[in-house]
Image (cartoon, rainbow, N blue to C red):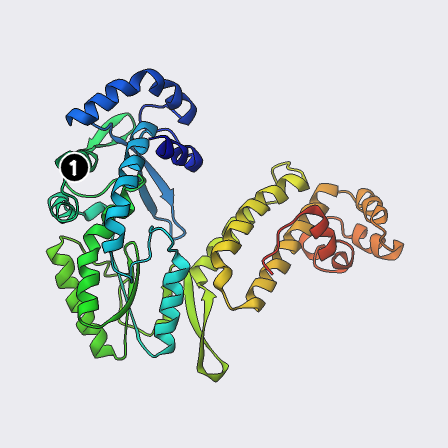
């Protein structure tokens, strides 16, 4: 439990329906844990409902999360630490999502290898976490875990209601509690038999949670795979997302935020997908808006956190030109912020001169003091240079 508590604290996260954050939960458990432990041992513990949270998506829809209480996240994490070493070694090698020592980049690299060899087709699941049948999931879990107490506790978490606006609005008979530590492992348990069926038929595929790409050589072969997966998902009471699923060229599809493109010599390379790039630009616009009264250092601090995280995930991209242009665009926006904050021509002239600008250049920029965006792409480039922004600690993608 100590190890589980350290992980929960490290993951941080919001309070659940009880309103207790991590610090307050720690105080609460000092006197409440003996009772909770007794209930867990007796099989009488009942988790609180999860708190419904909608996370906006780039297409305007929402991804629904259910946030358990910190206490329930602790118990789920402890369960995960017991179950994962037992279950993970039995899962398919083609499953890369939420497993120790595996990352999304492994799935992307596998996909690239298949596309290079000439295989292609994408199949996607619709709202998998919302559609899991509890009875089927528990049956699959029993085949791997022979402990009635653990099965009973997992069932209790699956059945926990969803609270919205202070009212428990959903008593669940399907769906896993997405947002809790157990969710990814339960998803892998359920989908492993589909992975095994694809392996038995010799297919090339990569799966990350409910995002699965299967690669074949022809349209007809892809249609057969699509029909097979629909049958297998029907058995599990799951539904394929018809709007996202397709039998198509891999070069027109995205997988885990990446897309494939053909370079010279018929070499398949990786790129950031158009949707991921659009999302990045949208977020940068929010972080570098010229209103809000923030200092340059505050803007850069926010940028650093987001850009470095984005860079770490999309570090596999083999499109240096695209990343270079994004760097230039971000600096352009930062120059515009400088001008907006200096505002008046006299202030602009004074600030530029203090930076060692030639009087002629400083005067030219100052004369157009209200044209922040246009001004920030002209002579100002030679004053507020890449080195200048490096000294300020502004992150770069290249």
117 in relation to 178, above or below: below
Provide residue 334's location: percent of width, then percent of height: 66, 50
Task: Write down the residue under mark 1.
Answer: 155
Choose between 97 and 317: the one closer to the eye: 97
Provide residue 237's location: percent of width, then percent of height: 13, 52
Provide residue 308's location: percent of width, then percent of height: 55, 51
Residue located farthest toward the right when viewing the structure as drawn = 359
31 in relation to 173, above or below: above
Left or right of residue 279, residue 211 in this image: left
Quarter of the view holding residue 46 = top left
Choose between 8 and 224: the one closer to the eye: 8
156 in relation to 277, above or below: above
Provide residue 105's location: percent of width, then percent of height: 41, 60
**Neighbours of disc 1 within 10 Å: few (<14), some (14-19), many (20+):** some
Element assignment for label 1: helix
Quarter of the view holding residue 246 = bottom left
- Residue at image x 28%, y 67%? 205
- Residue at image x 61%, y 55%? 396
- Residue at image x 18%, y 36%? 150
From where the camera sits, is residue 45 visible?
no
Quadrant assignment for the N terminus: top left
Quadrant assignment for the C terminus: bottom right
Left or right of residue 285, residue 69 in this image: left
């Amino acid at each position: 439990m100590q190890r589980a508590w350290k992980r929960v604290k490290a993951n941080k996260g919001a309070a659940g329906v009880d309103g207790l954050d991590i610090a307050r939960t720690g105080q609460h458990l000092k006197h409440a844990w003996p009772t909770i432990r007794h209930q867990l041992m007796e099989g009488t513990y009942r988790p609180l409902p999860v708190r419904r949270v909608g996370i906006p998506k780039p297409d305007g829809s929402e991804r629904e999360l259910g946030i358990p209480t910190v206490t329930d996240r602790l118990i789920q994490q402890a369960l995960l630490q017991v179950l994962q070493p037992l279950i993970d070694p039995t899962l398919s090698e083609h499953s890369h999502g939420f497993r120790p020592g595996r990352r999304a980049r492994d799935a992307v690299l596998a996909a690239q290898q298949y596309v290079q060899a000439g295989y292609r087709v994408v199949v996607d699941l619709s709202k998998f976490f919302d559609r899991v049948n509890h009875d089927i999931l528990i049956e699959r879990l029993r085949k791997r875990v022979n402990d009635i107490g653990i099965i009973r506790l997992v069932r209790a978490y699956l059945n926990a209601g969803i609270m919205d606006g202070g009212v428990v609005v959903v008593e669940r008979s399907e769906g896993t509690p997405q947002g809790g530590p157990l969710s990814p492992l339960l998803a892998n348990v359920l989908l492993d038999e589909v992975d095994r069926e694809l392996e038995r038929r010799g297919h090339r595929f990569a799966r990350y949670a409910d995002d699965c790409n299967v690669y074949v050589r022809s349209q007809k072969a892809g249609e057969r795979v699509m029909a097979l997966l629909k049958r297998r998902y029907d058995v599990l009471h799951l539904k394929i997302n018809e709007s996202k699923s397709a039998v198509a060229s891999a070069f027109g599809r995205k997988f885990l935020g990446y897309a494939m493109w053909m370079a010279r010599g018929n070499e398949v390379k990786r790129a950031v997908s158009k949707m991921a790039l659009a999302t990045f630009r949208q977020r940068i616009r929010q972080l570098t808006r010229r209103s809000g009264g923030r200092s340059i250092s505050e803007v850069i601090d926010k940028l650093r956190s987001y850009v470095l995280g984005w860079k770490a995930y999309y570090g596999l991209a083999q499109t240096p030109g695209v990343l270079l242009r994004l760097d230039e665009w971000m600096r352009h926006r930062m120059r515009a912020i400088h001008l907006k904050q200096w505002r008046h021509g006299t202030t602009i002239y004074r600030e530029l001169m203090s930076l060692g600008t030639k009087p002629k250049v400083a005067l030219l920029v100052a004369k157009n003091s209200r044209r922040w965006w246009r001004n920030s792409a002209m002579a100002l480039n030679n004053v507020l240079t890449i080195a200048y922004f490096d000294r300020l600690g502004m992150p770069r993608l290249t």
